[in-house]
Image (cartoon, rainbow, N blue to C red):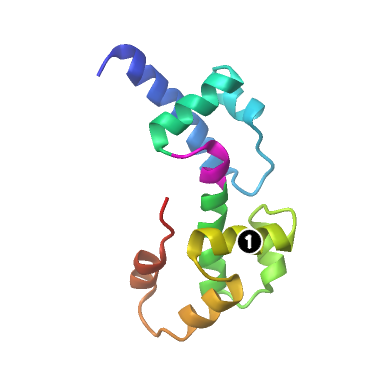
Amino acid sequence: MSRAVEESNRRMLRARDAMDRSYAQQLDIPTLARIAHVSEAHFTRTFRATFGETPHRYLQRRRVERAMFLLRETDRNITDICFEVGFGSPGTFSRTFHDIVGRSPRTYRKETSSAGVPTCFTMAWTRPSA
């Protein structure tokens, strides 16, 4: 691996780590590109080439993963969870959740709460795919 590729990967990892830490906040491409020290267009292309998905889709998936945990482990209102993980509206949350997980948040909660298996197995079986 060349030195330039290594440096590019480090920059993308820096931005992805920022997304992991601040997934519930409003993160836009200009902010993430500044974190990675690259232009906006270069950031989007390079992020997709490095991780196999766009920054927006990665952030959505990260938010849905956190929502899945909250749906499994708490009895909080689905709308509260939606806003806590960074979605702006319950409709967008529900649609995105269904696209990634394959079922609605309500159905997911009902199915996982009645499973009766250890959390580590539930997490492995229900982890959304990229």
Work out which quarter of the rendered image holds the N terminus and state it: top left
Q: Looking at the picture, how far across and down is residue 81, in whole percent?
A: 66, 65
Q: Which residues are magenta?
A: 53-59
For residue 52, above or below residue 97? above
Q: Which picture quadrant has residue 107?
A: bottom right
Q: Which residue is mark 1?
A: 95
Farthest residue in the top direction? 3
Q: Is residue 60 left or right of residue 52?
A: right
Q: Nearer the viewer, residue 102 or 88?
A: 102
What residue type is disc 1 on? Arg
Q: Magenta-highlighted stretch: main secondary structure?
A: helix
Quick check: is 39 in the magenta stretch? no
Q: Looking at the picture, how far across and down is residue 95, in whole percent?
A: 63, 61
Q: Would residue 73 be visible to someone looking at this image?
A: no
Question: Circle 1 sits in a helix, a strand or a loop, which is it?
Answer: helix
Quick check: is 55 in the magenta stretch? yes
Q: Looking at the picture, how far across and down is residue 20, in whole percent?
A: 52, 44
Q: Would residue 122 be visible to someone looking at this image?
A: yes
Q: Is residue 126 left or right of residue 19?
A: left
